[in-house]
Image: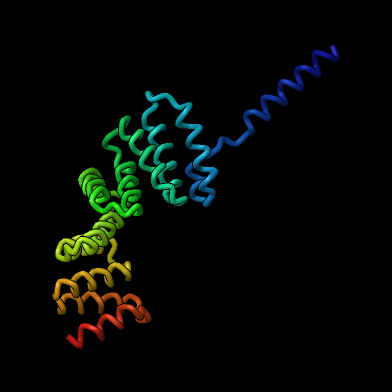
Amino acid sequence: MKNKILVIVLLITAIININGQEKKDALKTFREGRYKEAINITLEEISTIPDTSLRTKMDSYTVLLWSLIVERRYDDVIVYGNAARKLSPYDSRITEAMGEAYYYKGNGNSALTYFEQYAIQAPLGDRIAKVYNYMGEIYITQAKYNHADIAFSTALYHAPSVTRWWYRLGYSRELAKDFDGAQTAYNKALELNPSFAEATRALNRIRNN
């Protein structure tokens, strides 16, 4: 009798321990800044979640790519991003992450392709302002200053309080010889942050033109 009771107690204890174990949460781990751990969690999830559970699997791919970007593992982002896109070609989160990977690798043309796709897939997405900012930076490197003006202006339409983007808008206009427009953007940057020295120097610079 005592042995039976002991067995029952052990079984109950085991069940409590199993149920009490906290499921690893990749997104929570990512938000807590434990990126390497988030990568390990998501890789395990991707290997075990069936393709039929598409939304759950794409969530894991998304956190994986975000974590890899923070870790600057851009080649891995592209590898896993391509695998994710085979399952779900129109997941805007994957599209945006691919754009970032190519952006940080210095491949502006490929980055633009993905950023443009993201703008179509998620015109009001969480990353839309940053996407247009990235596009503006790429256009500056390509000496497409009017394109940069449009991209930065669109970024600021979605996020008008980002001081540095006003400065970069001013810079793109300065490069395009639109000094009045540049002055307006630089002044806006200083309105948001009066101690922004770069904008002050830029204003002094264009006033001498």
Q: Is residue 82 positioned above or below 4 on the image?
A: below
Q: How is the image coloured?
A: rainbow
Residue 27 at x, y percent in the picture: 47, 43
Residue 140 at x, y percent in the picture: 22, 64
Q: Residue at x 29, y 52 (%)?
A: 107
Is residue 6 shown to the viewer in this render? yes
Is residue 158 shown to the viewer in this render? no
Residue in front for this viewpoint, 150 or 113: 113
**Quarter placement of the C terminus:** bottom left
In the rendered structure, the answer to whether residue 48 lies left or right of residue 182 reads: right
Residue 25 at x, y percent in the picture: 52, 40
In the rendered structure, the answer to whether residue 30 lies left or right of residue 99 reads: right
Q: Is residue 140 positioned above or below 62 on the image?
A: below
Residue 52 at x, y percent in the picture: 37, 23
**Quarter placement of the N terminus:** top right
Q: Is residue 139 positioned above or below 60 on the image?
A: below
Q: Tell which residue pokes out farthest to the right in this image.
A: 2
Residue in front for this viewpoint, 153 or 2: 153
In the rendered structure, the answer to whether residue 154 lies left or right of residue 82 reads: left
Q: Residue at x 23, y 43 (%)?
A: 121
Q: Tell which residue pokes out farthest to the top in this image.
A: 1
Q: Residue at x 22, y 47 (%)?
A: 113
Numbered circles on residues, count: 0
Q: Residue at x 52, y 38 (%)?
A: 40
